[in-house]
Image: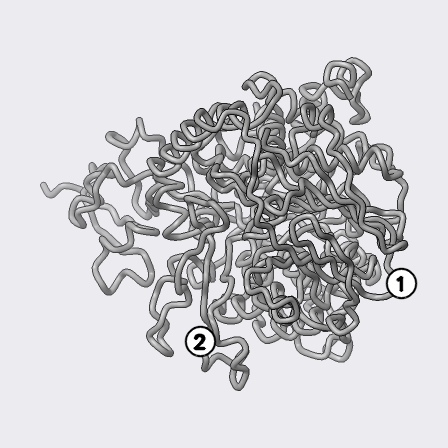
Amino acid sequence: MAWQRKILRVDLTAGTCTQEALNMEWAKAYLGQRGLATKYFVEEVAPSVEPLSPANKLIFATGPLTGTMASTGGRYSVITKGPLTGAIACSNSGGYWGAELKMAGWDMIIFEGRAATPVYLHLENDTATLHDASDLWGKTTWETEPALRKKHQDSQLKISSIGRAGENGVLYAAIINDLHRAAGRSGVGAVMGSKNLKAIAVRGTLGVAGIKDPKAFMKATAAAKKVLADNAVTGEGLPKFGTQVLMNVINESGAMPTRNAQDIQFDGAKDISAEAMHAPRVTDGKANLVTNQACFGCTIACGRISKIDQTHYTVVNKPEYWGASGGLEYEAAWALGSANGVNDLEALTFANFLCNEDGFDPISFGATVGAVMELYEMGVLTKEQLGIEAPFGSAKALTYFAGLTARGEGFGQEIGLGSKRLTAKYGHPDLSMTVKGQEFPAYDPRGIQGMGLTYATSNRGACHLRSYTVASEILGIPIKTDPLATEGKAGLVKAFQDATAVFDSAGICVFTSFAWTLVDVAPQLEAACEGDWSLDNLNVVGERIWNMERQFNNAAGFTAKDDSLPKRLLTEAAKTGPAKGLVAGLSKMLPEYYSERGWDTEGRPTAATVERLGL
Amino acid sequence: MAEASIRVTLKLYASLGKYLPEANRRSNQIALEVPATSVMTDLIAPFAVPPAACFLVLVNGVFLPPGQRPTAVFADGDVVAIWPPVAGG
């Protein structure tokens, strides 16, 4: 079996590390990573727990395919109760850290309590030790990673850490591994910071033993890799242009939230697109994009590596930002750019570097800046309060705020609380583009109706990675549906949500789903793992995971009224594009969605649903 | 009597941008004046864009289904944007 059957429990209050056997009954019902770690979480943590208290727990979890030869098998997730939302949080990251943890012999690590002073965990195969991290506290992730490699004299050490944002309680702080891969959303980094846990440094040399049928697994993974290679999206489009190719697609489709969702198309989109990243700059003749990059075991390689123009105002006399590092993905480019009306590609790249360096989510940060800029243009916030003029379109304000938020200085402390709290404080809560307190990403539900239902019902607050109906509504994957129609979207969203829960629990990247369906995943799991991983059962597993998360949120106090959208999307019609005159038709979709889910009118799984799913 | 013509903006994105004249590549678009009877293949033929590479086609932001591409004609002022297979998230 592809699980290591071993978890590490770290009591930060007591300073102890304890090995436990993985609960294999749960593994066969919840698969791994997102599903299995959430099962542990909901069994051990009260839904009412205060997210930043020692009673909250923080779980780093791999999936059964993590660390194997399955394509993209390098994923891990961080599960906790999120401080931004108060809902279940589950953030997924790539890079190399997840595979290293698995190859050190562990399926997951459960952190509980709070260390009295800053610590980091060092794992070398079976040996787990907590170390003093006082000298690392206050350092960025970019400083922490080399410092730990030097201290342990191990250049191959893989490190997951928080920067100053996590230490300072930025409610959307991220956990960063491999310098620029992130468990990015919902503030998992703030929970890590609240526990005085700076980093987890891992070295694993054991590999992943126990594949159920190695020969069948090699055959299944080879066949699945061929599907990825032969598919024009995963074999050509994503490696060459990355997710950023969507910038012009979504803008042309009239579904790009712009200037805090006042508009639905951005005339500067072409300047911050994938095509712009490839084009030689006027200033130095070099392109922003240096190369693409793959995570562990990935045969897609969609990651972007960029360099900032050394003459750009953001990096003049700052050689530490002249090197190649994690470039713009679509969501970040949108949040830092379109959401604020900023079309300066180099400024966006710099702000993105800061998000990686000090560990905070560019989506929530950028969207919060959008709210700040709207409040500034209304006269509610002033230059004196902000420290800078901040109209829409100001790259200088954007990068200034990124620095303040990274360092926890000045108005950055308020931006670090997210747009829900910030706009409420200044008397305009309707200007927060959030669901359950989390900022929505780069697709406007007025132009892509299924994404409205996706955001409203996402268990971790507004998110595109819980049900990416954009694939169907805009790109025609696996089938084309009308983005402006509400009919049929309830079933579409449910199908995407349940399937995505399986991808997130298997240890593979959800981007494989542009080419793979569960039909391609099932043979890999069947060959690797004991248990029933047939297509039929995987559909049930995905649905079970979704309902388990929902039950936790319901018990934490969320009700049907929280399955909503910002007032602007429901009442202010799109001004341009194909969706001109439309608002988000959530009320037409939500009752049908509840019915499809087997939930009552209050959004609670019925007794029959709970029994059917074995919850 | 001369055949009626219309003005259409053709946008070629991602790897299709290379088929545009050098001067148009940075903007990814070119203004065309074409016969009113033109269909999609007529728009891209002068630039040698392989029809098979045209995965996503939007006319004024609205999806043009593959089945309609051989026959759909355009209106004056239409914007026709074309991508190869792409995705993101």
User: Is A466 on the left-hand or right-hand side of B42?
Assistant: right
Residue A164 place in picture, x, y as percent: 72, 68
Q: Residue at x 43, y 31 (%)?
A: A218
Q: Which residue is mark 2?
A: A309
Amino acid type at mark 1: Ala
Residue A348 place in picture, x, y as percent: 53, 66
Amino acid type at mark 2: Asp
Does A321 sit above or below residue B21?
below
User: Is A457 on the left-hand or right-hand side of B84?
Assistant: right
Residue A314 found in image quarter: bottom right
Crowdedness near tag 1: few (<14), some (14–19) or many (≥20) residues, C-alpha within 10 Å: few
Does A215 sit above or below residue A238?
above
Does A217 sit above or below residue A337?
above
Front disc: 2 or 1? 1
**Mark 1: which secondary structure?**
loop
Mark 2 to mark 1 CA distance (whole Å): 43 Å
Q: Residue at x 28, y 50 (%)?
A: B16
> Where's the C terminus of chain A, which quadrant?
top right
Sequence order check: which comes first, mark 2 or mark 1? 1
Q: Residue at x 65, y 48 (%)?
A: A440
